[in-house]
Amino acid sequence: MLETKWIRWSYYIALVMLILALPGLILFGACSTLPSKVEAKAAIVDQLYDLQPNEAFIVQITQYLEDYGFKVDLYQGKDVTVDFYRKLPTREYQLIIFRVHSGLLVGIDQVTNKTWLFTSEPYSQTKYVSEQLTDQVTQAAINNYAPLVFAINAKFITESMEGTFKDTAIIMMGCSCFHFSDLAEAFVQKGASTYIAWDHSVLLGYVDEATVALVEKLCSEDLTIGEAVARTMKEKGQDPTYGSVLKYYPPASAQKTLKQLIK
């Protein structure tokens, strides 16, 4: 009889313990460890797509970004207009990679300290008249045989872009986008947390490969900006023709990872 009561009490105790444990088990089962990867949006602006496409570049960059946790939007060729640039901050991207042709404005006697980002929008004297008159937009061409398109500068970024960037990281692949500091300062003034670009002209094949290496180090290896830039330069070297090197701004961003910068 004593043994029967002991068995019954043991059963009750086990049942109560199981009931008490169930909420905790359910709660534990419904939760998962927070991912170490960020959940944010990134954009690839491929203005060069119509003239010099590189599908392998897009695929590889997209893979690194998605593995890191980004939702990736791709804008190519004719998507890249003056109004596209104007509204870009309102799209709330945390990272933007510009595969965009760029150049320095050549004056009568010398190169001025203005850097221009190309669009794919055909140039017209009767369009964006206010921006043209206030020296924010101009005509540009890749070479003497290419059609004229619109291009924007730092003044357009600070005065005509709508809204502000939300600690956005900017990777600029164009030529001489850090020859002067105008674009770097404009993007940071507009809310970017870091700006990474080359200081002189670059060959497209070189810059495509170097950018893939840079994004891999920022995303897959989770290096700081300073470490990622230094290791990319060590691995890829300077541009083989122009000797260009990769630089970043502001200096304080060197000590932070991509995740820390875009939080």
Image: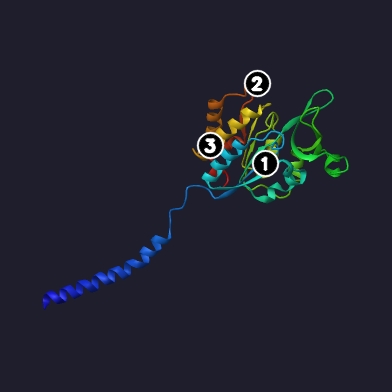
Q: Distance from label 3 to label 1 (Cα)?
A: 18 Å
What number is the disc on residue 45? 1
Colouring scheme applied when the structure was drawn: rainbow
Task: Determine which residue is flagged by label 3.
Answer: 216
**The N terminus lies in quadrant:** bottom left
Q: What kind of residue is marked 1?
A: Val
Question: Quick check: 111 left or right of 12?
Answer: right
Number of residues whose C-alpha sits closer than 10 Å to that of mark 1, classed few (under 14), some (14–19) or many (20 or more): many
Q: Alpha-carbon distance for marks 1 and 2? A: 25 Å
Question: In the rendered image, which residue does mark 2 sit on?
Answer: 241
Give the distance between the C-alpha atoms of the residues marked 3 and 2, in whole angstroms: 24 Å
Residue 110 is situated, as x and y percent measured from the top left of the image, at 80, 23
**Residues packed near mark 2 inside 10 Å, few (<14), some (14 to 19) or many (20 plus):** few
Q: Are marks 3 and 2 in contact (CB under 8 Å)?
A: no
**Residue 215 - label:** none
Q: Residue at x 52, y 29 (%)?
A: 231
